Amino acid sequence: MGRLYPWTEGSEIDQSQALCDVTELRWGRTGLFLPVRARIKVALPREFRLTQPGIYELEGNLSLPRAPQNPGQFDSAEYSLRSGCVAVVRADSVILKKLERWAPSFHLLLWAEISRQWISQALARGIEDREQDTAVLLAMALGASDAAGEEIEDAFRDSGTLHIFAVSGLHVVMLAAVVAFVLRWLGLGKGRAVFCLIAIVFGYAYITGWRPSAARAAFMIMLVLAAPWWNRRSAVQNSLGAAVLILLAYDSHQLFLPGFQLSFGVLWAIAFFAPPLLAALRPWTELDPFLPPAIASRWQHFSADSRQWLASLVCVSLAAWVGSLPLMLGHFQTVTPVGLLANLFLVPISGISIGVSCASLVCAAAGATGLQVLVNGLNAFLAWLMVLLASWFSSLPLANFTLDLRFEKAPPPVELRVFHLSGGGAASHLRAGDSQWLLDTGNVRAWRGVLRPFFRHQGINQLEGVILSHGDMAHVGAADLAYRLGKPRLCTSVHEPWQFDPPFAAIQQLAKKVPVDSLAWHRYQAEDRIEIQGSDAMPVHAEVLYPLLQDDAEKADDRGLVLMLHVGKMRVLWLADAGFITEKKLLDRCTDLTCDVVVRGQHSADFSGLTEILVHAKPKVLITSNDSRFPEETLPMRLRDYCTLNQIHLFDLEITGSVNVGFTAAGAELKAFRNGQTVSIVSSASR
């Protein structure tokens, strides 16, 4: 039982979810309601739409926010708790028990959504066919970055200009400048103009999701404008400190959010470093000291003003980069040197674009549709130009890179990280000395949410090789993104790319960019060998066990690569999603499956997980995927029972999270990321 409010993702209301301030709670249908004060996130029933404020009775399954399953992964549990949500409810039924007439928070959220929709329609009028440009403009004006797509967001992030792509203090300041100009043109008195300006600035910050940067800018503008009322002179650092105190008094958890830290840290750095840098450049930016300004020509004044503008831009960009560097390293282990140059071009263009967006809204309010379409056309060109520049800057050598800032003991010579991916996905990272390899890539969502944060966490900027087991999108959907990470060597089975796969399949798309059977793409079949690397003391290679050329099964899972990884004296059987057909052929051909560790996935459309494989392999450890939400992806109970009876250590990735296998000359140590399960084994050759 509790009050329901619309759920906002950034600035947009998500109709499928809601926020609930719980007042009463009971366990089961027969218990008594107990008074409780908590805030939870609610997944609403598909047919339900929240349109009325009030007290609602919810019935459904309550769960805690899920902790990260892999290193470097976004910690949604901590973020939810910082945001005040202690649990998540998947509601089966929602019943209005009491309608509330006075619900200002509820109606403010609905008003913000209506305003957001009006702004979206106004900025898109006349350029609806230019979807990418429109999406970029909406991302800049409203923070709706999802519409632009992750490719464009990556370009701005990798060029060090992501603050342009999202709502920031720059947007709020530009809006304030345009509104101030309009209010002066309308002849509004100073007192009324200041009041209207403050109201509009705070309204815009609220409409765009009350982001730390926008909220900070709104409070600072208010302090600057209100200072003369108390006969005070505004100072940037004092205003910044006051904005910090106000926002933290409202919600102290914001102090721990990277966005809050970056917003205030960068602005403080600009206020602290930019003035002395400008002072050092003053001899270059000013007129000749022996030339009286009154007799200087227009060209001389224009030249001095241009030098002053350029110097200000360079100094502010440098100060902002210096201020963001420690925070970017601390939170994201990322350095973007190209941002110093990219901001010199993109910041002025984005400023013009924001001004043009404001002009478009003025035209929409005045009903000047024809002029509005022309203005939006100009804005679409600016958006296209910004995407072009961001993509070009991000593609430059050493435009951005990550650093390994972990202070840990010396790692083992070779490590294998088996990731936990949901929905039947799979990916593993193999480090042999300084050589970085991937065994499958997961899909695009897994790449962005799991693998890329892991690479950033580990300071990995380049891959030497990528092994793609089969054409399942959950395994190789991010193959193109993996190939961009240093253009690694690609290794597939002899059957890939599969001739009957659709043209949009991941491996088919990759084949359009990389020639098959070239130095960049090697295809393998049983008895072939994939050289990886390592050292003389611990060489690493992969022996291909399956498939042969004649193993051209229709299902991708039945023709996927099966490898035996040789790491020194250790042997790891990598089965991918091998099913009944693959497992029976391995057994019928008397393939040597003896190993120390088995890594397997679940065949989603066939009987898989024969215990005979484990009988022949005689492993000490089984690492397996499992997704209990879907019967076809659930780990078979017979494998659990066999591991228990034969004292095989079972790492169920759904329970353990990702598993790291550290290889040494004597054996290997396995450690689970989530529950800390640790196992040490000795190599088969030593037993």
Image (spheres, rainbow, N blue to C red):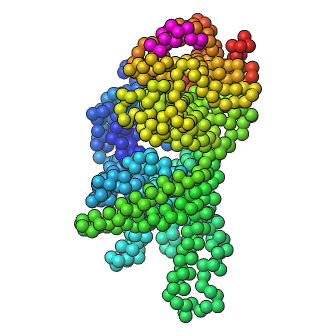
Q: Is residue 582 magenta?
A: yes
Question: Image point 34% across, 34% down: which residue?
Answer: 44
Number of labels in the image equals 0
- Residue 349 or residue 276, whichever sits in front: 349
For the question of whether residue 422 can be seen, the reply is no
Question: Image point 34% across, 67% down: which residue?
Answer: 359
Q: Is residue 588 magenta?
A: yes
The relative height of residue 217 versus residue 303 in the rendered view (above or below) is above
Q: Quadrant of residue 408?
A: top right
Residue 604 on image: x %, y %: 42, 20
Question: Image point 64% across, 16% down: which residue?
Answer: 596
Residue that sits furthest to the front in the current view:
518
Using residue 243 as the reference point, say whether residue 144 is left or right of it. left
The relative height of residue 406 versus residue 606 in the rendered view (above or below) is below
Where the C terminus falls, by quadrant? Answer: top right
Where the N terminus falls, by quadrant? Answer: top left
Which secondary structure class fits the magenta region best? helix
Question: Image point 37% across, 39% down: which residue?
Answer: 18
Using residue 40 as the reference point, say whether residue 127 is left or right of it. left
Residue 521 on image: x %, y %: 52, 34
- Residue 268 or residue 621, whichever sits in front: 621
The range drawn in magenta is 581-593
